[in-house]
Image (cartoon, rainbow, N blue to C red):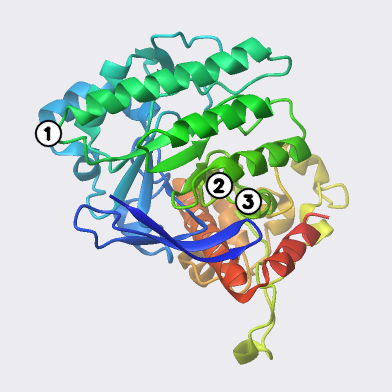
Amino acid sequence: MMKLTITKVAGAARLGVISSLAQTGERTMEIPGCLLYTRTASPPHLTHDTLQSIAGVPPVTHVTLSTLAEHHEVLEEYKEGIGKFAGLSDTLLYCSVNDPVSPNPPGFNTNKTVSIWSSGGRLELTPQKFVSLQRALKADWIQCLCDGEVMAEGCSRKRARKSVDRSLAFLDECLKLMSENEALKQKVVIGAIEGGDLQEERLRSARETAKRPVSGFLLDGFPGGSVSPEAKLSLISAVTTELPEEKPRLIHGIGRPDEVLECVERGVDLFDSTFPYEVTERGCALCFTYQYQPDPETAGEPQRPVLHKEELSNGENNEEGTEDAEIDRSNITPYEICLKEKRFREDFRPLLQGCTCYCCRHHSRAYVHHLLTSKELLAGILLMTHNFQQYFSFFRSVREAIRAGKLSDLKDMIRRQAA
């Protein structure tokens, strides 16, 4: 059974180590941290070899039931689990019910089943079917089945209450079924905290889930919805206050650096790494600094550049701005640059000065721009390599900031880059 040791608390932010991750008890993971995101149990755009070139890859890999459920029969016959099948046998696996990148449409869950969407369409999962799938997947951490539909604007109090009641019933049934199976009884179960936008239901879900024999908690359903950022953070604060200190708290779908830090300050420990994947899919590179204090050893060297407003130019001042106008900027954040823009055609700098990833050491912005405009697959590989390494390094900086008592300095620096 995994164990969380908290080494420092700064406000509600927690610094610590999760140990005894594997059955041998040899693996550890520092918090705050993130998981390695995969699609169909494969890191997007990357092979096993290219993944090894990335520094700081998390020890826990995130797989999603919605992308793997249709392969149930194959995995049952294989008998060795998705880790070995996908070449991930040297990592621990966390299996969530849904892919945070592709939330399910609401309105399909019932008191007896939870619907997930795979490439083959909608699948209805009963607790029995869910446990059968987990036997075939053999993940180490298992997010329990839950009624986790994201609450849309105008969701009724009755629907929020129902999401909590259903999730608790699914949790009880799954725990019972798993306790009857030798292969599953020792697995780490993550209980989901539901309740939509209603604080009293969120708190009820937290208290009741904490009474069950779960090893951690997922704060579910927080991305999207109708609540303001302030109300969302207030809900997260209220929920983490109710949860046991000795068990980790996860959240899905929150990945922007500024949003991550807000959640860390409110006691969230683990995040997914869907954000760098989404940045890659936009043809963008993460280009923000997390060096909140100068390194004495490199004081004479140029620091990593802060992202300026001109980095987000929409092409209006460019000679070829008309072509740049075709780029969809609706989801581009202040923490990334879009390499599809014409202004990078003759920009021979690395994606980010000072970055040590393979792409930044060997290639330029101009080359990645060329690959994107030529629709070469190598563009996704190079961007994913850079974005993953930058994101994993950001979490290391978060831990260092908490350790040094400088989390507010890091937060101020990240916030200024979004101004």
Q: Does label 2 or label 3 sit earlier along the sequence?
A: 3
Amino acid on which the number 3 mark rests in the picture: Val
Q: CA distance from mark 1 to mark 2?
A: 34 Å
Residue topped by disc 2: 280
Q: Nearer the viewer, mark 2 or mark 3?
A: 3
Above or below for 200 versus 337: above
Q: Nearer the viewer, residue 335 or 254?
A: 254
Q: Does label 1 or label 2 sit earlier along the sequence?
A: 1
Above or below for 30 versus 272: below
Amino acid on which the number 2 mark rests in the picture: Thr
Displayed quadrant of residue 95: top left
Residue 389: percent from the left, percent from the top? 49, 61
Question: Which class describes the residues within 10 Å of circle 3: few (<14), some (14-19), or many (20+)?
Answer: many
Residue 111: percent from the left, percent from the top? 44, 9
Residue topped by disc 1: 79
Residue topped by disc 3: 260
What element does badge 3 sit on? Answer: helix
Q: Nearer the viewer, residue 111 or 229?
A: 111
User: Would residue 257 appear left or right of 113 to someone viewing this image?
Assistant: right
Above or below for 391 versus 71: below
Q: CA distance from mark 2 to mark 3?
A: 19 Å
Q: Residue at x 38, y 20 (%)?
A: 170
Q: Residue at x 31, y 45 (%)?
A: 93
